[in-house]
Structure formats: structure tokens, C-alpha cells
Image (spheres, rainbow, N blue to C red):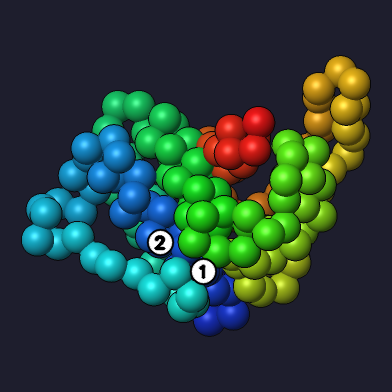
Amino acid sequence: MEADSAKIVSVSGALFQAFVNAGASLRLLLWGSTEGEEKFDVGAWYPLTKFRALLLLTGKYRNAGVILEQIGAEMTKCWYHQGPGRGIISSSVDFIRYQTGSNAFQSVISGPSEQVGTFALDGLDEAGGTALVRSTTVFPREMEKGILYGGLGLVG
């Protein structure tokens, strides 16, 4: 099944570049050597298996969850500042609705929903400042948390 999904599922270069940016901002050596650092085209698409291989590099650190959160936050920054984000969202509620409406999720991963999962808003209490998000995506939960925190931090 993994080999079949690798042929169908692809991930935006924005996620790969976010990985590089997170490593730089955390001053981590995620590539094994500084000469091994790659540059990714934010507008290109890469196989999911290649992204999973990058995520495995975080496993050599004791607090990999924190690193994955930073990768998620960097991805959101890249999407907002270098992509279409600034023209799409202007508030935290806009971000939550856009992110959980599958528009944002589908802008960074391509493939059948049964293989890539979903990211949905199950409840929103604007007055109370809470949202209930349901996720079945192929990404680590810590990374998804970073995406949400990063997006909320961008627009207040």
C-alpha cells in the first residue's frame, strides 16, 4: 500500500522549504552536514515518501515534537508571506476556517482523500476563542499543531 500511495500522493515544495527554514531557525543540523542542505522549489511537487524521509531526520533529537511544531509554523509563514496566504486571510477566524475547509490542506498535498486524509472544523466558538479541529492527515500531529499556532500568530 505504501508503494502505491507514493506514486499517487505528492507534497508541495512549500513543506520541504519549511523543513529547511525550521532547521535554520532552530539552528539544527537536519541534513547531516551543511553541505548537504537542499533547496526546494516552493511551487513544485515532490513524492510523499521523500517528505517522510525528511521527517525521520528529526528523530535523532530528543525533543522531536518541538522541531515538528516549528516545521509546521515555518510552513504557514512560507504560505502566508511567499504564497497566497496574505490575500486570503486577515484574521485568526479566517485562518481557522480556511485551514479546516480543506483548501489550505489540499494546497500542500495532492492525492485521494482516503490516502491523504482530511482536516476539518467540527466546532468554532468565536466568543470563547476555541475551535475543535478533526484531523486524519498523513502528517505528524505536532506538525499540524505548529501549522495552527503559526497561522494564528501571523494574524493575531
Query: Tag on residue 12?
Result: 1
Question: To which quarter of the image does residue 20 belong?
Answer: bottom left
Pick the front one: 152 or 9: 152
- Side (left or right) of 87 relative to 53: right
Looking at the picture, how far across and down is residue 90, in whole percent? 72, 45
For residue 140, above or below residue 117: above
Q: How many dots with numbers?
A: 2
- Element type at marker 2? helix
Q: Residues within 10 Å of mark 1 (few under 14, many from 20)?
A: many
Question: To which quarter of the image does residue 5 belong?
Answer: bottom right
Pick the front one: 129 or 46: 129
Identity of the residue furthest to the top in this view: 128
For residue 37, above or below residue 8: above
Q: Which residue is drawn at the image coordinates 68% and 59% (left, top)?
A: 87
Q: Quadrant of the C terminus?
A: top right
Q: Which amino acid does label 2 sit on?
A: Phe
Pick the front one: 126 or 112: 126
For residue 107, above or below residue 86: below
- Marks 1/2: CA distance? 7 Å
Looking at the picture, how far across and down is residue 31, in whole percent? 20, 54
Tell whether label 2 touches label 1 (CB within 8 Å): yes
- Element type at marker 1? strand
Pick the front one: 7 or 20: 20
Q: Can residue 99 be seen in this view?
A: no
Looking at the picture, how far across and down is residue 47, in whole percent? 46, 74
Q: Which residue is drawn at the image coordinates 35% and 44% (left, top)?
A: 22
Looking at the picture, how far across and down is residue 11, in whole percent? 52, 68
For residue 150, above or below residue 99: above
User: Pointer 2: what residue?
Assistant: 16
